[in-house]
Amino acid sequence: MAAIDNTSKTSASNSPHLSSDNQTVTAVAGAATLDGQLGVVTSESLTTAAAADYTLTITNARVKAGSVVLASVKTGTNTKVGLAIHEVTPANGSVAIKVRNNNAAALDGTIIVSFVVL
């Protein structure tokens, strides 16, 4: 996957440059560290209750309080459907991503959260 690098612009157009700054890590206790503009985080095994949120905090030097961070979620080893990004809160040096379990049952495994910092 390619990431958008807003720091380098082409002279012919004012379009963002695409780079391949992609990182993958596994979270421990709801936290992960990676400084890529684009990342994929696999959670620890989760048992998040129905209608509850799992909060993943990603430490990332590229994130600023005013950053736009786009996130998506899918199942890893978890077999329950109904996951949704509930809230994304960037801060200087980190972003908190809340994932809502919209299933009637608790989660039963890992989930995968992907993000890009614009």
Image (cartoon, rainbow, N blue to C red):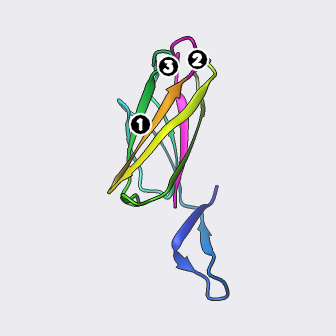
x, y percentage for residue 30?
Answer: 38, 32
Classify mark 3: residues with Cα within 10 Å, few (<14), some (14-19) or many (20+). some
Q: Position of residue 13 (x, y in %)?
A: 66, 83
- The part of the chain drawn in magenta is 102-118
User: What amino acid is found at the position of numbered circle 2 in the picture?
Assistant: Asn
Q: Which mark is residue 103?
A: 2
Q: Amino acid at mark 1?
A: Leu
At a point 61% along the width and 18% down the height, the residue shown is 80
Cα distance in 3D space between marks 3 and 1? 16 Å
**Helix, strand or loop at mark 3:** loop
Q: In which image quadrant can residue 27 be found?
A: top left
Q: Measured along the vertical axis of the image, is residue 17 above or below residue 22?
A: below
Precedes in sequence: disc 1 or disc 2: 1
Tag 1 residue: 56
Q: Quadrant of the N terminus?
A: bottom right
> Residue reaching furthest right?
12
Per the image, the residue denoted by label 3 is: 51
In the rendered structure, which disc, 3 or 1, sits on the residue that comes first in sequence? 3
Helix, strand or loop status at disc 1: strand
Contact flag, marks 3 and 1 (Cβ < 8 Å): no
Q: Could you tell me how far apart the alpha carbons at marks 3 and 2 are, in whole angstroms?
A: 7 Å
Mark 1 → mark 2, Cα distance in angstroms: 19 Å
